[in-house]
Image: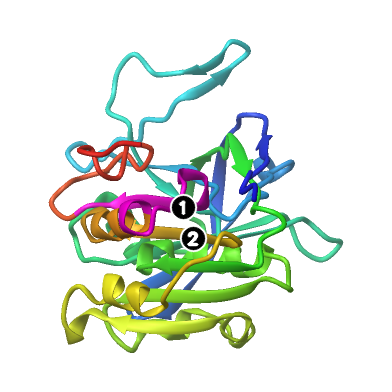
Amino acid sequence: MSFTREPVRHPMAVRHLTVARVAKLTPTLTRVTLIGEELAGFASDGPTDHVKVFFADPATGILTVPELTPDGIRRPESGTIVSRDYTPRAFRAATADSPDELDLDFVLHGTDGPASVWAANAATGDALVVAGPRGSRLVPSGIARAVLMADETALPALSRWLELLDPEVEITALVDVADASVPAYLSDELRLRADIVWLYRENGPDQLLAALRGLGPIDEETFVFGAGEASTLIPVRRYLRHELGLPSQQVALSGYWKRGVANLDHHAPLDPSDPD
């Protein structure tokens, strides 16, 4: 069967926004809600869309951002651009009682990165610059089942898959997280949408691949998505693509981050030794 995910293009935009509120979702996950006139026309239609969020250079404290010109995006002649990619968790268009609002969820991991530091200290009235998304890839149509894999960094994408897949699609989710504090991130409604297996890393490594193997055969009507730490997903990819022989269009795996690597390019091949 076809696993085509329709692409949708969006007008490019660099938006200067303001923090409206901050909510601690779990001990390690924080939601920042942004507002601003420049959110008008924001669109994000796919589960894996991403925006670029810009932060001040930790070395200088200076925020450098690209500019949108009639000829496209222009990079400033000086300054260091510090940015990270995030999946928009939710966008709510303005009503008579509230402005446009954009939710971004951040994983807090101490002082190891500019995004974590910013989110840990974010307060109402703070400024943040967000660019994109430049496009969306819609969920595949006509599938009977989806297997979704995620760690903390991919929980916004997992949530969007749960919301956007057709209600008739059977969903199994394997969620690889630090400990039992993380499941509170998902609403009761989303938990009921799928058969969710919570895998706690505090109980030992390599649980994700074992859980995936435990699902048994994956038929031709099942779409598989996974995102999170790249090294963890490489053996998962080898199992799906080589051992099970699933075609590339049936499997979408993305390394959102990698231990020991700053600002991993999630567009790069997950496994450089086997880049198909």
Image position of 206 with respect to 101: above or below: below
Q: Name the residue that disc number 2 marks.
A: 224
- Considering every residue shown, the one lying at the far top of the view is 71
Q: What residue is rendered at 60% in x and 32% in y?
A: 13
Residue 34 position within the rendered picture, expressed as x and y whole percent measured from the top left: 57, 56
Q: Amino acid at mark 2?
A: Val
Residue 99 located within the stretch drawn in magenta: no
Residue 16: quarter of image: top right
Q: What residue is rendered at 27% in x and 50% in y?
A: 114
Residue 179 visible in rendering: yes
Q: What residue is rendered at 61% in x and 86% in y?
A: 192
Q: Is disc 2 surrounded by few (<14), some (14 to 19) or many (20+) residues within 10 Å? A: many
Residue 28 visible in rendering: no
Which stretch did the figure color magenta? Answer: 241-258
Q: Name the residue that disc number 1 marks.
A: 251
Where the C terminus falls, by quadrant? top left
For residue 177, which numbered disc appears in the image?
none
Task: Determine the CA span between mark 2 and mark 1.
Answer: 5 Å
Q: Is 70 in front, or is 153?
A: 153
